[in-house]
Image (cartoon, grey):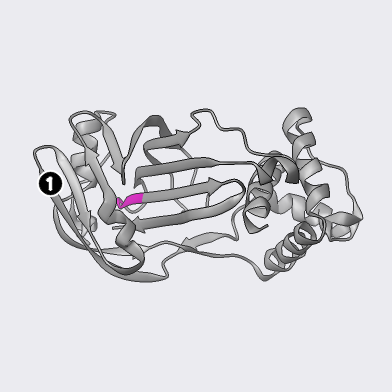
Amino acid sequence: MQLKQLFLILTFLSACGHSPNKENVVEQKISRNIQKDIDLLIPSGEIMVEIMDEVTMSPRRQVLQAKLMQAMRDNSEWFMEQQELVETAGGIISYDPRLGMTEPEWEEYKKYLNDMSDMQVVASDRMKVIITKSNGIISFKANGKLSHLNATTIDTQNNIVKMNSYKLIPLDTICVTSADNVFKSAWRGYKWQFSEPENVTMPTTPEEFANFSTKLYGLTLGLFEKTGKTYIEISGSEISEGMQTIRYKIPIVF
């Protein structure tokens, strides 16, 4: 149920409207030369990273979002239907009491969907990571909540990322030109991904979800324009016949 709600709110909200002291280094920029950029963004050696896995937001958004989440738990089938409508027709759904809010509250919440000025990603902790570069391969060594990094390698010569036994291929370049986001900075970077099946379609009904299986792994590497810091996020998700078997997301900044 939690995963269905996650799929739902991501689709629903998107349709209605993720160390070395770099302050003393010359300004760094993404060149779009992948080997050069990876070498720039990922130094070797022992570094301290910030684990950016918490989000702060205004008390009012928290209240309204909690109402929406509760409504999704109480009316999951209706929300699944709305997800399908939004995907096919687009736009914003009309007010309905099953949204868990009054109509004025829903109108208020919709404004938040296009305004993230009250939201910001913050660090929950700092931990040590050891980065090794050898023959064009970058590998990581970390403990605790960062241990999934240990199964991640980056082949800079062939532009391939491996996570466990899965080979991630380049998916897209990232170019965020505005600071109006949860990182409060414009940023650029790269993304690699593995998915099985290759072109996965998310389920839109409880029946489809019960028979749904997929594997999805990703790595995002970026440079924040405001601070000159590197952002790395690795994620893994596996679902077998509607049951979540693996799920993690590790976002770090250094």
Residue 11, given in percent of the width and then of the height, sits at 66, 42
**Magenta portion: prevailing SS class:** strand
Q: Is residue 229 magenta?
A: yes
Start-end of magenta stretch: 228-232
At mark 1, the secondary structure is: strand
Please state if 179 lies on the left or on the right of 1 as rendered.
Answer: left
Q: Is residue 84 magenta?
A: no
Please state if 189 lies on the left or on the right of 61 as rendered.
Answer: left
Question: In the rendered image, which quarter is residue 38 located in?
Answer: top left
Residue 80, given in percent of the width and then of the height, sits at 76, 45
Mark 1: amino acid: Lys
Residue closest to the eye, 167 or 226:
167
Q: Can the viewer see residue 180?
A: no
The residue at the far left in this view is 135
Q: Which residue occupies 21% across, 36% down?
A: 155
Residue closest to the eye, 89 or 103:
89
Q: Which residue is mark 1?
A: 133
Q: Can the viewer see residue 12?
A: yes
Residue 228, given in percent of the width and then of the height, sits at 30, 50
Question: In the rendered image, which quarter is residue 59 located in?
Answer: bottom right
